[in-house]
Image (tube, rainbow, N blue to C red):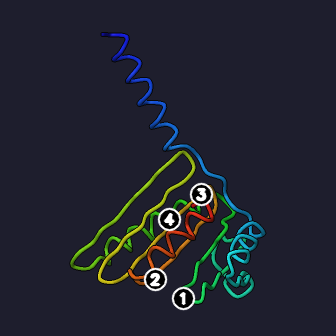
């Protein structure tokens, strides 16, 4: 009996660790390639924006919404902005809200549906991905998050 309980607990621990594992941050070239291969246009707007601590800023246009991809000089910079944006999204929630949150060893992901909007922010190491669109396009936005591994 004790052995069965121990095996069950060990199996559960392994599954939880696997689910909360780590992810690989994309480079600007990786982001551009994946988005262009999916038929979207990508523009490097790093030179247009002067954001503190940002090494690269790319925008992908799906034709229906945009995807922001930022690379910070340090992971703490991306983590801090992730937390600020998540708090702003939570504070801006409407009368009804559905949200998901995932955290792992090197990533965070927060998505929210509220008052007809779908919002997503995801961080992997020192990179950040932001999507804002309508609830009707949330499956398309989720597919992009999955495509990019965020």
Q: What is the quadrant of residue 102 in the picture?
A: bottom left
Nearer the observer: mark 3 or 4; the answer is 3
User: Which residue is tagged 2?
Assistant: 133
The crowding category of the residue bearing disc 2, from other C-alpha atoms within 10 Å (few below 14, some 14 to 19, many at least 20), is some
Q: Earlier in the sequence, mark 2 or mark 3?
A: 3
Q: Does residue 18 appear to the left or right of 126 in the view shown?
A: left
Q: Residue furthest right?
A: 29
Tag nearer the camera, 1 or 2: 1
State the count of labels: 4
Mark toward the viewer: 1 or 4: 1
Please report contact status of discs 1 and 3: CB closer than 8 Å, yes or no.
no
Mark nearer the N terminus (4 vs 2): 4
Look at the numbered discs 2 and 3 and tell me whether their residues touch, using CB distance below 8 Å.
Answer: no
Between 85 and 104, the residue placed more toward the observer is: 104
| Mark 2: secondary structure | strand
Cα separation, mark 1 vs mark 3, equals 25 Å
């Amino acid at each position: 009996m004790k052995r069965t309980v121990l095996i069950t607990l060990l199996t559960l621990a392994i599954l939880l660790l696997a689910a909360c594992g780590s992810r690989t941050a994309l480079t600007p070239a990786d982001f551009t390639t994946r988005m262009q291969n999916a038929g979207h246009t990508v523009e490097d707007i790093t030179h247009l924006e002067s954001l503190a601590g940002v090494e690269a800023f790319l925008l992908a246009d799906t034709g229906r919404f945009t995807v922001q991809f930022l690379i910070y000089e340090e992971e703490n910079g991306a983590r801090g902005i992730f937390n600020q944006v998540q708090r702003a999204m939570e504070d801006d929630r409407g009368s009804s809200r559905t949200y998901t949150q995932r955290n792992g060893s090197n990533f965070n992901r927060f998505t929210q549906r509220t008052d007809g909007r779908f919002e997503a922010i995801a961080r992997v190491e020192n990179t950040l991905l932001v999507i804002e669109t309508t609830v009707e396009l949330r499956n398309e936005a989720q597919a992009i998050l999955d495509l990019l591994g965020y």
